Image (tube, rainbow, N blue to C red):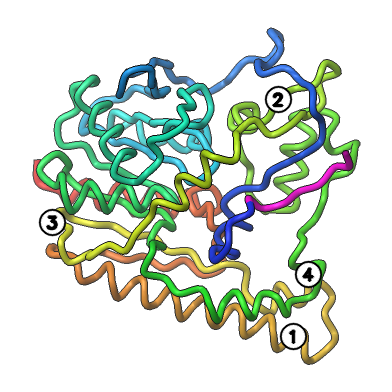
Amino acid sequence: MRNRLAPIPTPRKNFLLRLLILTLAVSTTGYAQPPASWHDPSKHKVQFVTVEDGVQLGVLDWGGTGRPVVLLAGLGFTAHVFDGFAEKLTDSYHVYGITRRGYGASSRPASGYSEQRRAEDDLRVFDALGLAAPVVAGHSIAGNELSQLGIYHFDRIAGLVYLEALNDGTDDYTDYDALCTKLPEAMQKGPEPSPAELRSFPAYRDWRARTDGISIPESELRSEFTENADGSVGSYEIPENVPEGIMGGEHKHDYSQIRVPILAIVGYPELPQDQIREHHLTDPAERTIVEAVFGTYVGMTKNRIKRIKSAARGAAVVELWGASHFVFLSNEEDVLREMRLFVKGLHE
């Protein structure tokens, strides 16, 4: 099997899936655990919470004092994606990260991936840890869990932080998807790592940093992929039913029913002129398509902002132009600043 990078096969969410997760098919053999020589440098404790018979979720506890802040990862990722970022919040808050069912060291049951069930899982973790009125921050697909908590369990939380997480079943991707099919083929497929870039997790991490412009913690990559006997990056570990169950169970949310304070941090992707320069596009028609795709996405994002501002207690929205979808990695300083201001403004 040749090395390749490809988005999880789900219709309708082309833009998100290109940014949310890359699945790597490089080998059919490997080891699920990293070698004894590798050590996770992040200063967190690891524990497991039973949320249902036979289902345990992995929870990272970075420590700290003050109001609890709980971090929820995007589709395809574990709480380890916040390693580094989370530690910078511990001077003011007690910071936790929950890895949802299906990923990392959490259980992988055959069912239970609806957003309602995932939100219930989060509540059971809150109960087990004794968390009172936490601020919950979620990236990407975790926005669905945030909305569930804010609409149906607002009495359990102090506030919500949407980290590039305003997409939900309300979005209509018809025009966007149609335009994306007209992009140059190289832009639709994306880059592929060479064998040398897969020889080790540090090498693969460096390649992702060069191609994606963000530095994903090695601990996160080791949670997603097996490791071959020679130390190279192996196959993607997550069975297809997990992302399919998550993506198939989302629905529209009436944001006006959210009754807690909201901070929404919105990132706009690489600007058209930068994409044109990066891909050396000289054909006027191709340039026009790139600009049209970006413009359509901006329009969709503006609609999302309008919807979230209808929340019962309003929403503070921060827009970051040129930011990655992983806004807490590409614009860490901005996100940390805005989160601190938001949490400081909440009533005890």
Q: Quadrant of residue 199?
A: top right
Q: Which residue is mark 3?
A: 259
Q: Earlier in the sequence, mark 2 or mark 1?
A: 2
Q: Nearer the viewer, mark 3 or mark 4?
A: 3
Q: Secondary structure at mark 3?
A: loop
In the displayed orientation, state which residue is furthest to the front: 110
Q: Earlier in the sequence, mark 1 or mark 4?
A: 4
Q: Which residue is mark 1?
A: 287
Q: Nearer the viewer, mark 2 or mark 4?
A: 2
Spatial CA distance of label 2 from label 4 is 32 Å
Spatial CA distance of label 1 from label 4 is 12 Å
Spatial CA distance of label 2 from label 3 is 42 Å
Q: Nearer the viewer, mark 1 or mark 4?
A: 1
Q: Which residue is mark 2?
A: 226
Q: For residue 291: magenta?
A: no
- 152, 239: nearer the viewer: 239
Three-letter residue code for mark 2: Thr
Mark 2 and mark 4 residues within 8 Å of each other at the beta carbon: no
Spatial CA distance of label 2 from label 1 is 39 Å
| Residue 89 place in picture, x, y as percent | 36, 36
What's the magenta bit mostly, secondary-structure-wise? loop
Q: Earlier in the sequence, mark 3 or mark 1?
A: 3
- 25, 220: nearer the viewer: 25
Which residue does the image show at 46% across and 24% down from the upper left?
106
Q: Quadrant of residue 99?
A: top left
Mark 2 and mark 3 residues within 8 Å of each other at the beta carbon: no
Q: Earlier in the sequence, mark 3 or mark 4?
A: 3
Q: Secondary structure at mark 2?
A: strand
Which residue does the image show at 38% across and 64% down from the upper left?
169
Q: Which residue is mark 4?
A: 278
Look at the image and give the residue range highlighted in magenta. 1-8
